[in-house]
Image (cartoon, grey):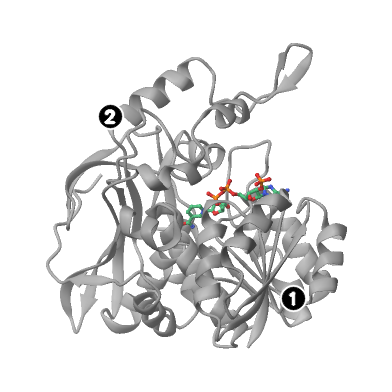
């Protein structure tokens, strides 16, 4: 049916690319383009021989001209951005220049400020609309599937949704005292930031990790979870009609938190450049270099993830609670694609969103968050491509802050 270009060849891209190859009816051709071409070539060597034709390219996605020249040469109909959030705007610029659809899994973050918000990407709305191309933002699991779950609940289960609690539990054990499950720099910037939740049209800010709850996760059991700021709160607050409160909780083990606290206390998580032996270095980037590569955690990680949304609202004049979630097993993911469940639960939705844009199901000119599209084809594809969802009409609720 068509050709996609995937930018980046790390943990998440590795899964998305393998899923594109499994879905060769849609992805006749893919181009894997990243900073380190040898990683693209190694993945191509592993996957060649199937029905999807694979090409590879070196690209520095910080440079619009380089990207645009590559897109003109390869002619994909969609670019799937699985590099880092720092590259979102340059890749969107290159898509505009070449009139190519755009999909990503994380919103833009300036490298020198630990802050993420949609403003920068929403500013592209008019230009994408005029160019007649679609940008689909935040197409991983969270953000991503959490937005699809919200749109599905709004369409099929509620007349009005009043509250959404997004719960992200990773009960995987990789045996290291401290490691992150996706890019350490992005992960640590996210969890060391202040927490916040959205209530009655305004943000309530909290100190980092200040709000803790224990939740008994289906198929996992009780885990400590902490309130974080997360990017989908911003778009869901606008796109889910009647919504009054949205919170995001993520589980962390004691060992992770103790190491993180210590690293913060000694300044290792800072993004302020420091002088080191006559050179400027950023402590967090140095820390990333000494931590285990998330891609290496696959063979060691045992246990499951459970990510989902608890909705509270009204249906037919009555109060209603509803929980939609997915449980994913780290070792099953490793057996299938050679990676752990955090990359898997992000890479599969990234492939699905790219498919829906490429085959026209989700094309509309402009810049959109995932919950602005019809959730039904995405929900069906989750069941087909490895992330089946489950539902409960009597979930345990999370105590109010
Ligand atoms: N929505 C979700 O649920 C979710 C969950 C997890 C992650 N994410 C997002 O998914 C994305 C990928 O995460 P990951 O864990 O796969 O990260 P990763 O393993 O660090 O991979 C990032 C890839 O991007 C490449 N890259 C970095 N800068 C580049 C540049 N200037 N030009 C070209 N390529 C560049 C890297 O190249 P090198 O190999 O040379 O380093 C690497 O291949 C991130 O944006 C992350 O925030 C989303």
C-alpha separation, residue under disc 1 versus residue under disc 2? 45 Å
In the image, taking residue 112 as reference, residue 223 lies left or right, namely left
Depth check: give the residue in front, 217 or 397: 217
Q: Is residue 53 above or below residue 189?
A: below
Looking at the image, the residue that sits furthest to the front is 49
Whether residue 378 appears in this view of the structure is yes
- Tag 1 and tag 2, C-beta contact below 8 Å: no
Depth check: give the residue in front, 199 or 261: 261
> Residue 254, labelled with which disc?
2
Depth check: give the residue in front, 4 or 295: 295
Where residue 97 sits: x, y (%)? 84, 70
> Residue 263, labelled with which disc?
none
Residue pictured at 55% horizontal, 86% vertical: 25
What residue is disc 1 on?
100
Residue pictured at 35% horizontal, 69% vertical: 387
User: In what quadrant of the picture does the N terminus appear?
Assistant: bottom right
Q: In this view, does 128 lie above or below 395?
A: below
- Decide: few, some or many residues near mark 2? Use Cα within 10 Å; few <14, some 14-19, many ≥20: few
- Decide: few, some or many residues near mark 1? Use Cα within 10 Å; few <14, some 14-19, many ≥20: many
Classify mark 1: helix, strand or loop.
loop
In the image, taking residue 186 as reference, residue 300 lies left or right, namely left
Where residue 139 sits: x, y (%)? 51, 66
Classify mark 2: helix, strand or loop.
helix
In the image, taking residue 235 as reference, residue 256 lies left or right, namely left
Q: Which comes sooner in the sequence, label 1 or label 2?
A: 1
Residue pictured at 18% horizontal, 81% vertical: 317
Depth check: give the residue in front, 341 or 397: 341
């Amino acid at each position: 049916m068509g050709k996609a270009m995937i930018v980046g060849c790390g943990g998440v891209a590795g899964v998305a690319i393998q899923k594109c190859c499994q879905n060769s009816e849609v992805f006749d051709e893919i181009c894997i383009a990243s900073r380190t071409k040898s990683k693209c070539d190694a993945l191509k060597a592993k996957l060649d021989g199937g029905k999807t034709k694979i090409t590879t390219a070196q690209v520095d996605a910080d440079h619009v001209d380089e990207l645009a020249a590559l897109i003109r040469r390869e002619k994909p109909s969609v670019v799937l951005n699985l590099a880092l959030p720092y590259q979102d705007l340059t890749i969107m610029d290159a898509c505009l220049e070449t009139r190519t659809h755009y999909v990503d899994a994380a919103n833009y973050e300036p490298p020198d400020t630990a802050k993420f918000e949609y403003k920068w990407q929403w500013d592209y709305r008019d230009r994408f609309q005029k160019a007649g191309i679609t940008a689909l933002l935040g197409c991983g699991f969270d953000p991503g599937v959490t937005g699809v779950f919200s749109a599905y609940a709004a369409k099929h289960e509620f007349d009005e949704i009043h509250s959404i609690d997004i719960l992200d539990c990773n009960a995987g054990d990789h045996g290291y005292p401290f490691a992150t499950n996706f890019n350490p720099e992005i992960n640590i910037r996210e969890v060391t930031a202040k927490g916040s939740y959205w209530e009655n049209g305004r943000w309530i800010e909290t100190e980092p990790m200040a709000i803790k709850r224990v939740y008994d996760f289906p198929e996992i059991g009780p885990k400590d979870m902490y309130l974080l700021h997360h990017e989908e709160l911003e778009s869901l607050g606008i796109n889910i009609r009647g919504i009054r409160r949205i919170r995001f909780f993520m589980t962390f083990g004691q060992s992770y938190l103790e190491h993180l606290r210590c690293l913060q206390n000694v300044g290792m998580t800072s993004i302020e450049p420091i002088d080191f032996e006559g050179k400027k270095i950023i402590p967090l980037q140095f820390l990333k270099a000494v931590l285990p590569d998330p891609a290496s955690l696959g063979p060691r990680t045992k246990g499951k993830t459970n990510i989902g949304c608890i909705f509270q609202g009204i249906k037919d004049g009555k109060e209603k609670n509803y929980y939609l979630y997915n449980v994913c097993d780290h070792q099953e993911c490793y057996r299938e694609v050679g990676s752990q469940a955090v990359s898997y639960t992000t890479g599969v939705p990234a492939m699905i969103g790219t498919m829906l844009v490429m085959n026209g199901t989700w094309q509309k000119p402009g810049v959109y968050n995932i919950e602005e599209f019809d959730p039904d084809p995405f929900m069906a594809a989750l069941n087909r491509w490895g992330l089946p969802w489950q539902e409960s009409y009597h979930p345990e609720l999370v105590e109010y802050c």
